[in-house]
Amino acid sequence: MLRNYNATVAKIMAIYGKRIKPQDYTEMMNKQNVSEVAEYLKRNTHYSGLLSSIDTNTIHRGMLENLLRRSVFETYMKITGFEHISKQEFYNYKILQTEIDEILRCIRFINAKSQKLITDVPIYINHLTSFDLIELAKITDFNELLAFLKKTPYYDVLKTIRPNGEGLVDVTKCETLLRSYYIERLKSSLHFKKRDVQQFTNLLETDIDLINIINAYRLTAFFNEPETEIEKDMLPFYGRLSAAKQKEIYSAPNSEEFIKKFSRTYYGKQMTENGYDINSLEQSAQRLRHKYAKLMLKRSASAPLSVYSFIFLLEIEVQNLISIIEGIRYGIEVSKIASLIIM
């Protein structure tokens, strides 16, 4: 018999109730420096515990951002450990995500002929990953990376990749393969009630559709990539945007035509109806993803949907805070920072 894990859902809603509110964002955007933002978070928000032992007068931007990112994972571990739901494969999806993110970061450092600083490694999850993150950070060659991953599923995902004559690896292709593997693993772990599986699949396919659109738009707007090249780099999964519809959008010769074609789709119409600026496509796509996650969290009493939606919303909250921190650090106007906040 499948359990409901109602206590986990209730715990999520209790934590979500303490989220950063619009007035908090306004207060922080008007602070003069990073220390003042940190002090506000410490005194007035659910991040008070995170910062309780931190001297906000001496904290620097990088440290504060790392602490905020770490807090997402710690909250995730607290939630999935509450009723021991982490024993089910699905609820380990964040660990899988982190492993993939770290492999991709390693590949980028290999291409840059650089080495990742150990201080940048999320060591706090090293006891949960299928490989040693510290050892991964020491790798400087792609063949060395493949050998390192030999006993993990990632080896089979990446084994056909070959560096070019200059030793550079196609990061985009690696990312497409790894993200596709992640989605397949996630789908295969959905051992829940039929209704929950269908709702989660719909939410996941929406995420994939919008991620593909964001990436395709970048390739069109900034690199002028042709449709055939764009298709190679997209995740091979489809929700409301069929393969044929995506192909039609990717055929746009420039960013203006891309947006025009996209505006006629379900998601384009949703952006317009919600008052989002479709010309700021990336920002609007994230706003739409945020809206869907909020609706799912509000309407569903399902543990998998609640966990997935809440963690996504928490990640957006942290990204909002980082936008404020970096905006203040680099002297960006408050109105510009405000335009980046997703609520």
Image (cartoon, rainbow, N blue to C red):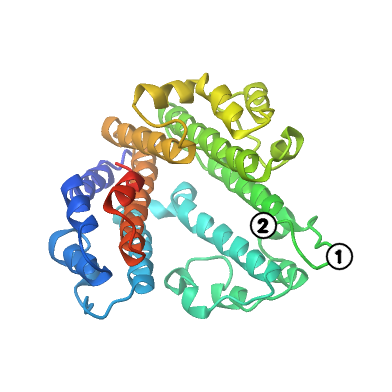
Q: Is residue 38 left or right of residue 86?
A: left
Q: Is residue 41 above or below residue 190?
A: below
| Disc 2 packing (10 Å; few <14; some 14–19; many ≥20) | few
Q: Is the residue 128 above or below the residue 218 in the image?
A: below
Are discs 1 and 2 less than 8 Å apart at CB?
Answer: no
Amino acid carrying label 2: it is Pro
> Could you tell me how many numbered marks the image carries?
2
Who comes first in sequence, dot 1 or dot 2?
2
In this rendering, does residue 1 appear at all? Answer: no
Residue 195 screen position, x and y as percent: 41, 26
Amino acid type at mark 1: Gly
- Looking at the image, residue 108 lies above or below residue 253: below
Residue 223 appears at what percent x and percent y? 67, 45
Determine the image quadrant of residue 154: bottom right
Residue holding disc 1: 165
Q: Residue at x 39, y 44 (%)?
A: 308
